[in-house]
Image (cartoon, rainbow, N blue to C red):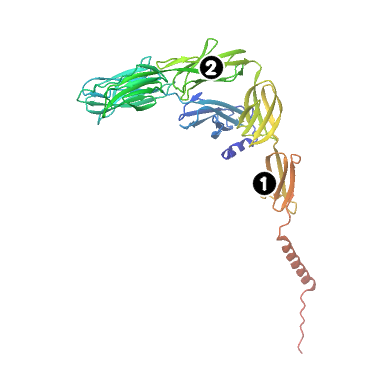
């Protein structure tokens, strides 16, 4: 946080702004990694604003000093790193006398997978059907391209998968050789764009007649008998990749979705067989056990299989709360607020596809109470200055307070509250929380050291050091009035030094001390010399110079 020092120091300056207020917002509640978040700050025209963005783990993402324009508005463009973490990001904004915060979510849109099953070898001049599947079984629109040998990509057509996720594109090869095949989905609000590439060979000869014998359907985890008489091996293509199987094999089906099975002999591939591996999946709901009326609650549905792009429905008491799409780690997040007191049983279910069948999962019992209150805990030092980068512990929760403010929702009552600052406990006490703003005064004090020269005059520009035992804590220079200020010192006994002068100070019992610098070492010899010169001059002045002149007769 060293880079934050110039910005945070801004808020130590007292500025007169009439009726300070501040509002911060973002242009969207959800962003993807690699996109731009626009942050808008509104407040008094011309006001200086410190802006800080923190990531899901409390890490510093951005720090910016803004100045509101004549209309009281300023914008900040936050470029999200393509590799940034998913989760809730918090925006803190502060100006003297006012504070505001907002939050946004960074999520990667789930990406469906496209599995292509073209014939292995086809005959030039004859129309072929290219089979494809949008995993996990989605009726999305797909654009198909073909690149013939030595040519460019050609549009083969745009097709929409059926309700089961299957689609078919038609193409007639006119050249011999290996053709590249690409199917692309352009993306939507629910799903990220995706594409897949495969190939097939066009020849003058008729395609080979080898075939693979396999069941059409099976369940995940079962063993399937896969046979190909006269083949060298079987090429199996799934959403997890490709693998080679023996011509006669009993295979454990460990990947849900279509298995595209190609007969292979030499370098030639025949027409594939398709084995659809189905799976049962459940969704268990996770979240808090208690919330207040109107309090936003984040619910998480965790799937029994880490499958993305599945639609998950949240329900309570027969009422659908919302539907969200599962992410790459097999979870689905929903933020909801309940408007009435009561006990709610929240369930989540996966909407079935041609691959996945839904099973009941674990529900969540959520008690919504009316006596919970919103509390803003403001941490200040002994001078009332906001204590940045503090951590507040209350009710078993650990709250980050990068701008000196922590917010939480608790039941009314008395709580043990502790404030940590740079790993040091600076406040600990029993505090009653009933809602609204609560100021926590940390035990951090200022110490003023005044330095005078040997004549008793202020000594500007002197270097003053402060020690805790033998450990040097800080160095400050005296100002034009000979004063050096050390801020936010915990209680204790300190030693302050300036040149050869030093003193011990007990904080907070003493708020200041004065150091008297001794005369410089060169002063005594110079003084002696000056005295000698003065005495010699005095002697000459009193006696004068006598010259006797004799007259010669």
Instruction: Please state which of residues 407 and 183 is positioned toward the viewer in this rendering.
Output: 183
Circles 1 and 2, Cβ within 8 Å, touching? The answer is no
> Dot 1 corresponds to which residue?
471
**Label 2 element class:** loop
Depth check, mark 1 against mark 2: the one in front is 2
Dividing the picture into quarters, in which one does residue 168 lie?
top left
Image coordinates of residue 10 in percent, x first then y, are 61, 37
> Dot 2 corresponds to which residue?
362
Horizontal side of 198 relative to 535 (left or right) equals left
Q: Which of marks 1 and 2 is nearer the N terminus?
A: 2
Residue 340 in view, yes or no: no
Horizontal side of 128 relative to 545 (left or right) equals left
Residue 65, relative to residue 128: is it above or below?
A: below
Instruction: Please state which of residues 94 and 213 is positioned toward the viewer in this rendering.
Output: 213
Residue 516, relative to residue 20: is it above or below?
A: below
Image coordinates of residue 441 in percent, x first then y, are 70, 32
- On the rendered image, what quadrant is the N terminus found in? top right
Horizontal side of 107 relative to 391 (left or right) equals left
Horizontal side of 174 relative to 327 (left or right) equals left
**Label 1 element class:** strand
Dividing the picture into quarters, in which one does residue 197 lie?
top left
Image coordinates of residue 384 in percent, x first then y, are 69, 33
Neighbours of disc 1 within 10 Å: few (<14), some (14-19), many (20+): few
- On the rendered image, what quadrant is the C terminus found in? bottom right
Q: Residue at 52% x, 27% y: name it.
A: 87
Quote the CA–CA distance across marks 1 and 2.
56 Å
């Amino acid at each position: 946080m060293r880079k934050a020092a110039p910005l945070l120091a801004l808020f130590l300056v007292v500025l007169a702004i009439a009726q300070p207020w501040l509002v911060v917002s973002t242009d969207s509640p959800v962003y993807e990694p690699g996109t731009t978040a626009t942050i808008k700050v509104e407040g008094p025209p011309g006001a200086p604003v410190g802006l800080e963005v923190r990531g899901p783990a409390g890490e510093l993402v951005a720090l910016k000093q803004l100045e509101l324009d004549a209309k009281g508005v300023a914008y900040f463009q936050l470029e999200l790193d393509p590799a940034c973490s998913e989760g809730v990001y918090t925006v803190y904004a502060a100006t003297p006398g006012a504070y505001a915060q907002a939050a946004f979510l960074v999520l990667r849109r789930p990406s469906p997978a496209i599995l292509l099953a073209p014939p292995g070898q086809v005959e030039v001049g004859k129309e072929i059907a290219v089979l494809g599947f949008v995993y996990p079984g989605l009726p999305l629109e797909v654009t198909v391209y073909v690149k013939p040998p030595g040519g460019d990509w050609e549009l083969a057509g745009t097709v929409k998968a059926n309700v089961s996720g299957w689609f078919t594109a038609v193409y007639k090869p006119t050249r011999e050789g290996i053709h590249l095949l690409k199917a692309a989905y352009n993306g939507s609000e629910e799903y990220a764009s995706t594409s897949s590439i495969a190939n097939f060979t066009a020849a003058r000869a008729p395609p080979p007649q080898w075939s693979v014998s396999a069941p059409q359907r099976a369940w995940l985890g079962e063993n399937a008998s896969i046979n190909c008489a006269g083949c060298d091996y079987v090429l199996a293509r799934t959403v997890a990749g490709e693998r080679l199987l023996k011509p006669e094999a009993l295979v454990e089906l460990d990947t849900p979705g279509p298995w595209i099975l190609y007969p292979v002999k030499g370098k030639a591939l025949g027409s594939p067989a398709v084995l659809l591996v189905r799976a049962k999946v459940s969704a268990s709901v996770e979240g808090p056990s208690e919330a207040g009326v109107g309090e936003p609650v984040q619910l998480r549905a965790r799937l029994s299989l880490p499958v993305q792009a599945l639609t998950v429905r949240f329900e309570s008491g027969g009422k659908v709360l919302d539907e969200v799409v599962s992410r790459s780690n097999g979870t689905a997040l929903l933020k909801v607020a309940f408007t009435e007191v009561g006990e709610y049983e929240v369930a989540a279910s996966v909407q079935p596809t041609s691959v996945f069948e839904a099973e009941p999962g674990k529900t969540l019992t959520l008690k919504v109470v009316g006596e919970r209150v919103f509390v803003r805990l403001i941490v200040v030092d002994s001078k009332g200055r906001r204590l940045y980068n503090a951590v507040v512990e209350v009710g078993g929760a650990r709250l980050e307070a990068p701008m000196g403010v922590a917010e939480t929702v608790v039941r009314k009552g008395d709580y043990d509250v502790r404030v940590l600052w740079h790993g040091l406990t600076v406040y600990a006490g029993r505090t009653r929380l009933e809602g609204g703003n609560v100021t926590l005064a940390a035990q951090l004090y200022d110490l003023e050291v005044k330095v005078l020269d040997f004549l008793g005059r202020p000594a500007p520009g002197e270097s003053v050091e402060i020690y805790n035992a033998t450990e040097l804590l800080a160095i400050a220079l005296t100002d034009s009035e000979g004063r050096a200020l050390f801020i936010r010192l915990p209680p204790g006994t300190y030693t302050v030094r300036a040149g050869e002068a030093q003193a011990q100070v007990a904080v907070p019992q003493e708020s200041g001390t004065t150091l008297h610098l001794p005369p410089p070492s060169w002063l005594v010899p110079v003084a002696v010399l000056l005295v000698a010169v003065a005495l010699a001059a005095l002697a000459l002045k009193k006696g004068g110079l006598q010259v006797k002149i004799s007259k010669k007769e």
